[in-house]
Image: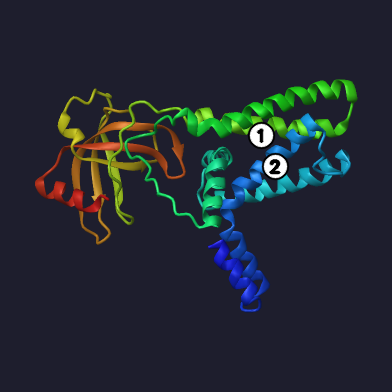
Amino acid sequence: MFKRLFWYFLKNPFSLSPFQWWEYFLSSSYYFAGAAFFTLMICPIAYILFKVPSFFAMPGIYFLTFIPYIVLSLSVFYMALGLRNYRSNSLFSGQLLAAVTFPVYMRAAFFALIGKRVVFEVTSKDGRHTPSPGWLLPQIAMLLLNFIAVVWAVNRLVYEHEPALLVNGFWALYHFLLLSSIFYFSEEEPGRIRGKRLYPGTDFSYNIINAQNLPVTDKAAWRICVTVFLPERIDAGTQLMCKIKEKGGSSFVFEGVVVWSGRSAWRKGFETTVGVLTASESARRQLKEVMK
């Protein structure tokens, strides 16, 4: 999309307003975010280890201009998305994911620029799995480089007393902490069970009828499972009376049991998988029709 937009801009620069061109370039260059973040990580490392400067402003002026900018931009970002019912922890996790997946963005941007088609990999629906170490080599390499840079910045600061080392050491430490989250995201969540999702416009409501958290021994509960987001975390084994209201207005009920519940809340709530215990044939048929 970016290449097509660039050539179209060279051929017809006045076909759109400057504001429209700006918006199109911003949206079509999103996958360059990986290369941009990689460059931001390399610059402090290059200065600390090889004395290659990345900026020439005085550290005091840099802090006085950058700190208000980053505080204001992050405040506006969290406040604006908070008004759209996004949870702060979900936004924070999204920012961490965008940082640690920089090799994926760089690879996608490179293949797109050279016009090479790659296979689209569908995310596994049977839970979160630990990736192979080979997939994490870029992140681990940058993690080690940033750690070495932090240690070396402290040593140089003790002997050289150069304020720029404090600035670059701070960014190396910041990037080290960001990349450390790769171990959190690559940890496999044990026992995760996923069912099918409901189609948009389908409402799910429930009442707890037995909160004794009994072990799920009825294998029938595993045959039909639906994954929904609930406002509260309900332990596995809790029996529910569930009601599903279809987009057209019709509704049906069934007795279910929680077979898996997520440990943390996301934007829509706690991800919960409910298995069907008791339901009429018509309810089972309707449930299968509203699941995707």
Neighbours of disc 1 within 10 Å: few (<14), some (14-19), many (20+): many
Q: Nearer the viewer, residue 110 or 175?
A: 110
Q: CA distance from mark 2 to mark 1?
A: 9 Å
Residue 252, position as x, y percentages in the image: 19, 50
Colour mapping used in the image: rainbow
Q: Position of residue 65 (x, y in %)?
A: 82, 47
Q: Would residue 204 be found to the left or right of residue 79 on screen?
A: left
Q: Amino acid at mark 2?
A: Leu
Q: Is residue 223 visible?
A: yes
Mark 2 packing: few (<14 Cα in 10 Å), some, or many (20+)? some
Q: Which residue is mark 2?
A: 40
Which residue was labeled with disc 1?
A: 175
Asked whether the viewer can see residue 78, the reply is: no
Residue at position x 25%, y 62% in the image: 248
Q: Earlier in the sequence, mark 2 or mark 1?
A: 2
| SS under mark 2 | helix
Q: Position of residue 164 (x, y in %)?
A: 84, 34
Quadrant for residue 246, please give it. Answer: bottom left
